[in-house]
Image (cartoon, rainbow, N blue to C red):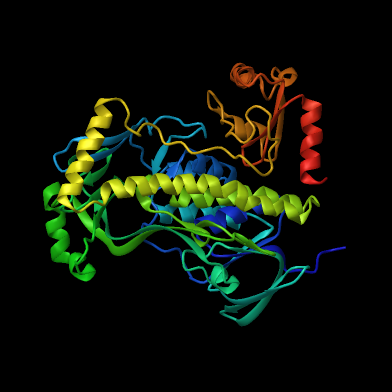
Amino acid sequence: MADPRDCDVLIAGGGPVGVTLALLLAQRGVRVIVAEKEQAIYPLPRAAHLDHEAMRILQEAGVADAVMATSRQTGRYEFRNADGEILLLFEGSDRIGPGGWPGANMIHQPSVEAALRSRLEGQASAQLRTCWDLKSFAQDDDGIIATLDTPEGAQQVSARYLIGADGARSPVREACGIAFDDLDFEEPWLVIDTLVDDPARLPTANLQICDPARPTTCVLMGEGRHRWEFMIKPGEDAAEVASDASIVRLLEPWQVEGAVRLERKAVYTFRARIAAQWRQGRVLLAGDAAHQTPPFAGQGLCSGLRDAANLAWKLAAVVRDGAPDCLLDSYQPEREPNLRATIQMAIMMGRTVCLTDPQAAAERDRQMLAARAAGQSPDGNLAYPPLDTGMIMAGSAGAGSYFPQLLAGSQRLDDVLGAGHWLIARSDLHSPPLAPFAATLAEWLDAHQAEAVLVRPDRHVFGTGLAADLDQRWALALGL
């Protein structure tokens, strides 16, 4: 019997997180409607960075190559004091990370969104409805009834689930009355995006200038663009700092007159906060609707895409495969610890940068330079904790860890094995699909003293052990 609902999942918000989630669901046969209140993609840059894990998610969505075509890589992220001395250094971000893509990819967000929407148009079970503004919704044990303003007037949409991917001001979150856990970071900054005419005159590393006179960020963006961010200090007028004359003065030390042209200026308040609940019945939150992070670790959009990857396979298991609804209860417990570690890293970086008291900054410099000299600096490659709860086989070696995407020549493991969960056993390593990766897979199994590994659809390890046992445990965990 056909489901009488208009869709399985209604997604409020047609930004990169909402559309990525829609793609991951549609590719699994889930019927999706994306309701986006604006008519077109916002044409100016916002997010600047995608890491290797985010790129792997976009690979599954079918847009990674298009995104990479306009992105740029850099191998260094430097935190320097006013004298140019390095306080923190993160290197090697242009190398291939565990996700099978470069560790840091500087992007042009409108290009990313255009690639996602173009891909979504080809999905038979997905619809993107622009100029559709969610006004209210009601839920019961069977589903959601949402009322939206559309160009054709008020419309009602019935769905099994509603996802609020509708940004930091999320009307979905507000309607649910969900409060934030404020992590005590709130700083106003001026963001300046520029078009580049002479790239030879611009830095090739991403920089944080920890100068108490004016904390400053300078980072690459997607092809042909560069960004500066300037902290608005206590007592300053944001409008005055953002004036054209002020921007000229702020850029003078960079000696880029004639090398760049202003594309956008905007004042943002960088915040750190997490929604207390990411699920309320048949309503779930994702991306900025569920959490906001300062930009210093470049993890805002990456975190939202991880939400989409976690939610997509679980929603598909419930909607398509008959898994129990309680599977969705694992979403926030799995994602929140990783997210909190991500935000704490960003806060640490932000507090390093945002000191405006000269004496406090001098003491910071002394301590951080001494730590570097002693080999105790907290820099290196950015890494975040594995899953430690939820849909994992706790106690088995590697459970909850991130399973790497192996490369063999031009082949990527994810493309060879496809979507869904993987059960990889030693006895299968020399079969045609796995043979190019056999040596590296054997090394992974050796390191975990395992005969087999079961990898979840979001590429976290469910568990290790004997293949038959893993298969049975996975089915039991899904309630199938």
Q: Position of residue 216 (x, y in %)?
A: 23, 50
Q: Is residue 159 visible?
A: yes
Q: Is residue 98 left or right of residue 108?
A: right
| Residue under the point 42% across and 47% down | 344
- Relative depth, front residue between 32 and 374: 374
Q: Position of residue 3 (x, y in %)?
A: 81, 65
User: From what the image shows, is residue 464 above or below residue 281?
Assistant: above
User: From what the image shows, is residue 428 above or below residue 320?
Assistant: above
Which quarter of the image is occupied by the N terminus?
Answer: bottom right
User: From what the image shows, is residue 403 above or below residue 3?
Assistant: above
Q: Is residue 252 left or right of residue 7?
A: left
Number of numbered discs present?
0
Examine the image and state in which quarter residue 172 appears: bottom right
- Relative depth, front residue between 340 and 159: 340
| Residue under the point 83% across and 45% down | 480
Q: Is residue 61 left or right of residue 219?
A: right
| Residue under the point 71% across and 24% down | 452
- Relative depth, front residue between 209 and 9: 209
Examine the image and state in which quarter residue 209 appears: top left
